[in-house]
Amino acid sequence: MQMAGLGYSEEQIELLDVATSFCRDKSPIDKVRKLMESDTGFDADIWAEMAALGWTAIAIPEVHGGVGLSLAEVVPVVEQMGRHLMASPFVASTLASQTLIAGGTETQQSHWLPKLAEGAIGTLALFEAHGDWDLGNITAAAKSDGDSLLLSGEKLFVQWGGNAELVIASVMLDGKAALILLDAAQVAGRLRREAIIDETKRSFALMLDGLSIPKSAALDIGKAMQILAHIEQAATLLQSAEMCGGSQSVIDYTVSYLQTRKQFGKIIGEYQALKHPTVDAYVDYEKARSHLYSAASSFSDQGLGEVAVRMAKAAADGVYSFAADRAIQFHGGFGFTHDCDAGLHRRAAIFHASQFGDAAWQRAKLSHLLLG
């Protein structure tokens, strides 16, 4: 099996250049910490700027008001967001649009995709209390009631649900997995803010009990499992990008400290016990980033794309966790306080690992894909 090359498209290079400066300027660490304490968790004005730049439209077809590129071009943007811990509904909204592209009806696509392209916020409601990363394990249900569907159950980790105009939820309908569209009015009063370890994000539980929606709100039921598989791969790719960006940031943060902190009359970066793990983290980061852009290039290739994406997530999860953990340790007592930025990255790494499968889970999936 031959993996994709490591080159970059012109579009990726241009987007990386713009995203690098934009995220650096719009998401300094003091702004990150300020937003962590805010009600919404993100800056609506900056979100509008991102939409004006066309980022929310990157992977949406031109026929629906999008730019007409692919997730490969979304990757460099998300990477820089992760590098600067940029709080925004960008990934959640991109995944919502990908869901519609993969299995929405013409009516659903023509109604929602132009809105998402212009900056309307969408999100997904796929996880439940059992914590299974198998998206086909669904206990929330939809029961036919004439021309309507009566819903029951609860969904967890609905990211940015409090500001979403569109929520796409997974349910079981007539013994089969199904995806349904819910608008802001339908979920109003049904969302409960969750306390999660990564405070740069906002997460909600969604109670579905007693909610009635028209049957036309369901996506193509015959494609539901195919859509869920696509969502998982898309989410895993974008998580890998965010984690690679975060890894670069926390390594830079650590190196800066090692080059300036003195102890016993020496710069502490001269000590091998600190130097060698930092080099290991950097080498692993470069490997993970190579996996990331290989996965971005081969994402749409059947079979090969899944292998590349799972390798990317496993590598990114490993290095982000390790680099952030070493950064905390190397900062001594300060590293264990809330004021140390390394702790924010460690929390982000833990949360990413909890969504769509950690490194061990990805490797288990890879073993079946590669060894049969």
Image: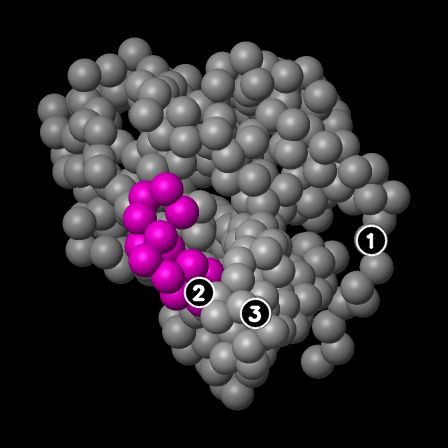
Q: Which residue is mark 1?
A: 8
Figure quadrant of the N terminus: bottom right
Measuring 84% from the left and 59% from the top, which residue is drawn there? 7
Q: Position of residue 334 (x, y in %)?
A: 35, 52
Q: Which residue is mark 3?
A: 266
Q: Nearer the viewer, mark 2 or mark 1?
A: 2
Magenta region: 325-340
Looking at the rendered structure, the kind of residue marked 1 is Tyr
Lateral position of residue 302 relative to residue 354, left or right: right
Q: Along the polypeptide, which appears first: circle 3 or circle 1?
A: 1
Q: Which residue is mark 2?
A: 330
Magenta segment, principal secondary structure? helix
- Which residue in the rendered view is the most extreme toward the left? 210
Q: Is residue 303 visible from the viewing direction of this image?
A: no
Q: Position of residue 224 (x, y in %)?
A: 42, 46
Choose between 338 and 161: the one closer to the eye.
338
Q: Position of residue 371 (x, y in %)?
A: 52, 87
Looking at the rendered structure, the kind of residue marked 3 is Lys
Residue 218 image-quadrant placement: top left
Q: Along the polypeptide, which appears first: circle 2 or circle 1?
A: 1
Marks 2/3 in contact by CB < 8 Å: the verdict is: no
Marks 3/1 in contact by CB < 8 Å: the verdict is: no
Measuring 15% from the left and 38% from the top, which residue is drawn there? 153
What secondary structure is marked by label 1?
Answer: loop
